[in-house]
Amino acid sequence: MALAEQGQRTGRQPAPLLRWLKPAVLTVGSIAVTMLGLLLITFIIGRVMPIDPVLSVAGERASKEVYEQVYLELGLDKPLLVQFFYYISDVVRGDFGQSLLNARPVAEDIMRVFPATLELATLGVFLGIVLGVPLGVVAAVRRGSWIDQIARFVALVGYSMPIFWLGLMGLLVFYGILGWVGGPGRVGIFYVDVVPSVTGMILIDSIIDGNWAVFRNAFSHIVLPAALLGYYSLAYISRMTRSFMLEQLSAEYVITARVKGLSEWQVIWGHAFRNIRVQLITVIALSYANLLEGSVLTEIIFSWPGIGSYITTALLSADMNAVLGGTVVVGFIFILLNVLSDLLYKVFDPRAR
Amino acid sequence: MNALSREWLLTDTPTSRMHARMSSFYKGWLALRSNTLAMFGLGILVFLLAVAAFAPWISPHDPFAQDLANRLQPIGSDSHLLGTDSLGRDILSRLIYGSRITLYIVALVALIAPVAGLLVGTVSGYIGGWTDIVLMRITDIFLAFPRLVLALAFVAALGAGIENAVLAISLTAWPPYARIARAETLTIRKSDYISAIKLQGAGPIRIITKHIWPLCISSLIVRVTLDMAGIILAAAGLGFLGLGAQPPSPEWGAMISEGRRFILDHWWVATVPGLAIFTVSLAFNLLGDGLRDVLDPKDEGR
């Protein structure tokens, strides 16, 4: 523990302001530029879209006067740069326009569907960590053994398998044939809207409500898609863990520890593993970001009402505001998690400072 | 001369540039050949190429011919080795023709994305200064995006279809190549032989195309091979969502999407094309791993 605590302590020390100011400004600046880039791309996509934005607001049979009015209201007569500025200020205020399908604000819709995705991805990455880290460590320690081969095979299959197909096969076997898990959707039809929505995550809501029947049902529905996402993050996390561990195990301090007569357990978990924790955190943050995205296809297969389903449904009905709003939100989270993993690395790894 | 003999290829003292090139190629091939898994992957890909090339001769039925009397026949039924789909079309024939679509997508993306990345990366690395900062910033922005979601948005704007799917995937796939090409360029740019060529009066375009590009190729090839699996999966995902190849095209992802409705009663309709996708992307991963070990031994076993 000593090394890590020391690391955290130095991380929290009130450092001289200037030493922190420059990197902080640089980080914020680079986030801002990246996000501006994202908005520029979604703006361009929205502009080249063959669908007339006026008709989508005013309706197909709008009279010429209404058309003109909406055209001016949307600011389409202004130069593109000005329109882009309007777009940015709208997004900054959390306004993604209205959905064409249900005429509700897109931001509200996204807030409503996002907890479902968060719940699924969190459980998935949790499974990936719990199974992937030990697998990677053991594979590195017993390099070349049968367990290393299995770990390699598991990862290789994970990289090569179409996620939506594996999900279908899971549904076929575990729901259709064995009947071990619940089918598509978040809960069975008798449990819909039984517990009040507090966090929007049914597992947590049912615990808050103390309704264990709902919890069990919701769990039987989430376990398969979460296991699927967990498998994909396991493939990545176990590979990275293995290569980090191999690097540490070949270091001289490991030989010293062994010569000192420390138990193998102490050498592996007390010394080598301690030194890869920082790298692991960044890997986990990245795989979490990837899961938020990877859940798009998974959500379709499992009729999971999250942001992936939302974007795809909107896409197929040409509801551009919803598609771009969803893209921007997923992109922002993705960028933030990337930055966060960078930052964690810098804060906790003394060498990177 | 006993050209192309084993000794001639394995020599330590090549007599010409061509000799040296073939010699190093042969040594790489020997190293790759000893990697069983990589050869297995290569074998699958050669087989896929053959299947795609001879599709009209080896497929037992017309992939588009509907036969509603024989719909949803199971695997191993008369004259339909892998069964039929919901319109009575022979799944094996559709699979065989679908290999052409898969190869078409892979080939196009493998042409567009690395070339675009190579262009951006070498220009950025060679010219440096503000050009470098701006181009790398753009690359970083694309790298920071969720790829599939961005591809979805692009397809939404461009309209569904194979070519647009290829374009959308390429647009999200080029940044890593730009990074690699830039890194290679930075190490080459300051070397003596570049200065020598400059003194001979070569302009930047000649230097980049004739002297920097060839040296970036090998690391790009490894990366492309490793990325192929991801590209196939992305294309299949877009097809599955109905945004890639359009029906009645026998694209494998779209075939899974069609079979999805019958998954519980007629499992083979969706299972078979999924296995095909898995096999091909596994083959690319195996070959890519092997190639990396040959061309870039320092990462071995990772």
Image (spheres, rainbow, N blue to C red):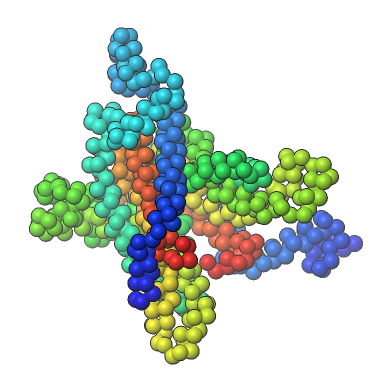
> In screen coordinates, is B296 left or right of B147?
right
> In screen coordinates, is B211 left or right of A211?
right
B170 vs B258, nearest the viewer: B170
In which quarter of the view is residue A19 placed? bottom left
Q: How many marks?
A: 0
Expressed as whole percent of the image width and height from the top left, the position of residue B155 reads 44, 35
- Mark yes or no: residue A111 visible: yes
Which quadrant, please, contains the N terminus of chain A?
bottom left
A307 vs B182, nearest the viewer: B182
> In screen coordinates, is A54 left or right of B221?
left
Residue drawn at x 71%, y 52% as measured from the top left: B190
Question: What is the residue that sits farthest to the right in this orientation?
Answer: B1
Expressed as whole percent of the image width and height from the top left, the position of residue A332 reads 37, 44
Residue drawn at x 38%, y 67% as measured from the top left: A10
In which quarter of the view is residue A98 placed? top left
Expressed as whole percent of the image width and height from the top left, the position of residue A239 reads 46, 65
B129 vs B67, nearest the viewer: B129
Residue drawn at x 32%, y 63% as measured from the top left: A127
> In screen coordinates, is A218 left or right of A297?
left
Residue drawn at x 79%, y 42% as measured from the top left: B202
In which quarter of the view is residue A105 placed? top left
Expressed as whole percent of the image width and height from the top left, the position of residue B153 reads 41, 36
* Residue A57, above or below A345: above
* Residue A2, above or below B72: below
B231 vs A5, nearest the viewer: A5
- Mark yes or no: residue B60 visible: no
* Residue A353, above or below B182: below
